[in-house]
Image (spheres, grey):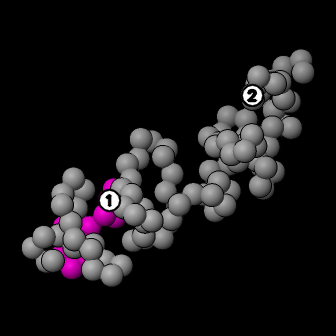
Amino acid sequence: ITSGGVTYHDQPWHKECFVCAGCKTQLSGQRFISKDEHPYCVDCFSKLYAKKCAACKKPITAFGGAKFISFEERQWHGECFNCANCSVSLVGQGFLTQQDDVLCHECG
């Protein structure tokens, strides 16, 4: 490696050889997530490993300091954790559950 190398797990890589374990896209200069000692692009990691939001069904990633809520076996993006009836945000609030729904105290 004479120039433009990448260091990953204290090992040198040619930038063209440092690729996503899923889709083989070059990761040099890109955000990536390491799983089981392998680097993944955000899209592959999201599809393969990220938990899905109980409300919008999209992957939950922690990039950009994103907050998420976890209750029992379910997770929500902070912006998706709303009352199923009136849509008020339940972040930092008490809530009730009714089957798969979460409800504010007013609606519960």
Q: Residue furthest right?
A: 1
Location of residue 86 by image quarter: bottom left
Residue 79 bears which disc, if any? 1
Residue at horizontal 73 percent and vertical 35 percent from the top: 28
Magenta stretch, residue numbers:
77-89
**Residue 51, above or below 13:** below
Dot 2 or dot 1: first in sequence order is 2
Q: Which residue is mark 2?
A: 9
Residue kind at label 1, given as amino acid type: Glu
The reply to whether the magenta stretch includes residue 81 is yes
The reply to whether the magenta stretch includes residue 6 is no
Q: Secondary structure at mark 1?
A: helix
Badge 1 density bin: few <14, some 14–19, many ≥20, Cα 10 Å: some
Q: Position of residue 108 (x, y in %)?
A: 15, 77
**Residue 87, above or below 77:** below
Q: Residue furthest left?
A: 106
Q: Position of residue 87 (x, y in %)?
A: 22, 72
Residue at horizontal 84 percent and vertical 19 percent from the top: 3
